[in-house]
Image (cartoon, grey):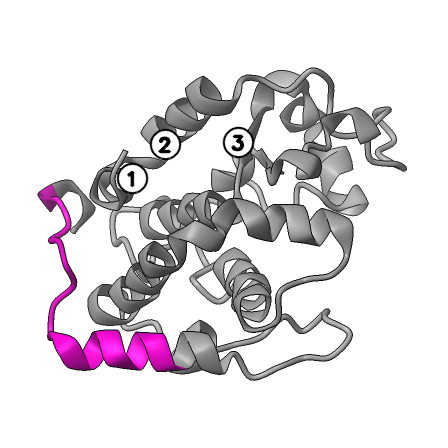
Amino acid sequence: MTLNEEWNMTYDEYVQHLLDKYGVALDDYFCTKECRSKNRKVSRTIEGLECHHIDEDKYIHLSTKEFARNHWESQKAERLVYADLIEHLLLHIKITRENCIEVNPNADPNSERANFGFDSGCLYLIGVINTMFQFKPEIAWKADLFEKIEPRFDDYIEILSMLHIYYNVPFEILFTGDVNAKYPCRPQKVIDAVLRRMNSSPKCHFIRSENNG
């Protein structure tokens, strides 16, 4: 599948694509309804994959104990999907462009997601990915995540460029580093690549579908 095809899918279509690609979760995200501890059975980082709550397009912070307790059904195995870091970012881009009223005037203003833009889930994932491309991670599970996305550096740069061109996402978001890293960095490799990409052409390599604005 090309990046063009990934970008133009709706959130629901992309979730289904990832379910078909990686299969379904074998257990719930938390061990019990009290949501005190994450279920180790859902981890697939050794394959370079993270677990994503499908209902994050409706509810916020589903991986945190406090919010998870309010939405137990969203923690069930059938409401989970796997993705590598770049696919995970694309999921959150789709969540924002479909459910944030600042980006999509037709979004439901009463949704928990209505006021959460690209500076929420997308910002976090961008920071993590930027830092990995700047300094290849040494911790085993992080190295596994990075190995999965390392060949897609050009696609990643294209995604950041599109966020800036089509949605005016500021460079301070695109050029952030992982704030939780032991040594927060300035991701110069990503910065240089995005600026070269922006200078090479005023438009990205492909045009979004009409359905995506």
Q: Nearer the viewer, residue 68 or 190?
A: 190
Q: Is residue 52 visible?
A: yes
Question: Measured from the top left, where is residue 110 in percent x and y?
Answer: 45, 46
Q: In which quadrant of the rendered view does residue 156 lie?
A: bottom left
Q: In which quadrant of the rendered view does residue 27 lie?
A: top right
Please report the residue visible at 21 percent of the width from the left and 44 percent of the height from the top: 4
Amino acid, disc 1: Glu
* Residue 41 placement, left or right of 84: right
Q: In which quadrant of the rendered view does residue 134 lie?
A: bottom right
Q: Which residue is mark 1?
A: 6
* Residue 178 placement, left or right of 57: right
Which quadrant of the rendered structure holds the N terminus? top left
Q: N-terminal of the two: label 3 or label 2? A: 2
Please report the residue visible at 73 percent of the width from the left and 27 percent of the height from the top: 42
Is the residue under label 1 in contact with that under label 2 (CB below 8 Å)? yes
Is the residue under label 2 in contact with that under label 3 (CB below 8 Å)? no
60 vs 162: above or below: above
212 vs 25: above or below: below
Q: Secondary structure at mark 1?
A: helix
Which disc number belongs to residue 164?
none
Please report the residue visible at 53 percent of the width from the left and 31 percent of the height from the top: 54
164 vs 183: above or below: above
* Residue 188 placement, left or right of 104: right
Q: Which residue is mark 3?
A: 54
Q: N-terminal of the two: label 2 or label 1? A: 1
Is 188 in the magenta? no
Amino acid, disc 2: Tyr
Please report the residue visible at 15 percent of the width from the left and 77 percent of the height from the top: 200
